[in-house]
Image (spheres, grey):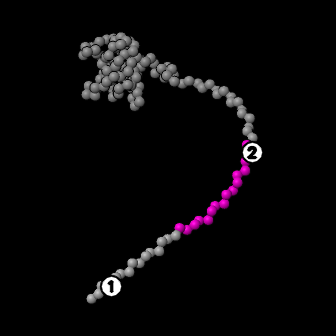
């Protein structure tokens, strides 16, 4: 038996296809557009300020803010910015809090007191939940 030799078949190489060249168009210089004259702006009208001053008048004098709340005994710790006495009416206002109440129990270091001065941290019995950073106003 004689072995037959296989013929090597050459594949034809693909020739690159030439793409037709794009036509070039000469750009002509454009004339600059005419500018409109600048108009002077009128000064803005003054706005009425309705900020913190309006809130203070509505709710009374700011005398402190809540620093902590104890839910089991419904007591709040208040850092005072002004004097406070037993029998005063307070308004506690916050993001979700709006409470008005009479002071019935006030303490410093678990000792009952009848009045407190600026800078004291007092414990106060409250009727409902309050939150840190709520503002306390004297009505």
Mark 2 or mark 1, earlier in chain: 1
Residue drawn 45% across and 18% down? Answer: 60
Residue drawn 70% across and 30% down? Answer: 40
Residue tagged 2 = 31
Badge 1 crowding class, 10 Å Cα cut-off, few under 14, some 14 to 19, many 20 or more, is few
Percent of width and height locating residue 109? 25, 15
Percent of width and height locating residue 46? 62, 25
Please give the label number shown on residue 4: 1
Q: Secondary structure at mark 1?
A: loop
Which range of residues does the magenta coloring cover?
A: 16-32
Location of residue 85 with respect to 75 vertically, above or below: above
Q: Which of the pair 127/84 is nearer the observer? A: 84
Percent of width and height locating residue 114? 31, 11
Q: Secondary structure at mark 2?
A: loop
Percent of width and height locating residue 89? 39, 18
Residue 6 is drawn in which quadrant?
bottom left
Location of residue 139 with respect to 24 vertically, above or below: above
Q: Is residue 123 visible?
A: yes
- Name the main secondary structure of what is drawn in magenta: loop
Q: Is residue 33 left or right of residue 52?
A: right
Please give the label number shown on residue 16: none
């Amino acid at each position: 038996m004689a072995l037959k030799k296989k013929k090597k078949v050459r594949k034809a190489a693909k020739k690159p296809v030439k793409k037709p060249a794009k036509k070039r168009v000469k750009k002509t210089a454009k004339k600059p557009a005419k500018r409109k004259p600048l108009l002077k702006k009128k000064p803005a009208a003054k706005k009425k300020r309705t900020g913190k001053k309006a809130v203070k008048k509505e709710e009374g004098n700011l005398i402190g803010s809540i620093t902590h709340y104890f839910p089991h005994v419904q007591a709040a710790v208040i850092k005072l910015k002004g004097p406070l006495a037993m029998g005063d009416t307070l308004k506690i206002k916050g993001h979700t809090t709006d409470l008005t109440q009479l002071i019935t129990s006030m303490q410093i270091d678990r000792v009952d007191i009848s009045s407190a001065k600026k800078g004291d941290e007092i414990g106060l019995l409250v009727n409902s939940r309050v939150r840190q950073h709520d503002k306390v106003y004297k009505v």
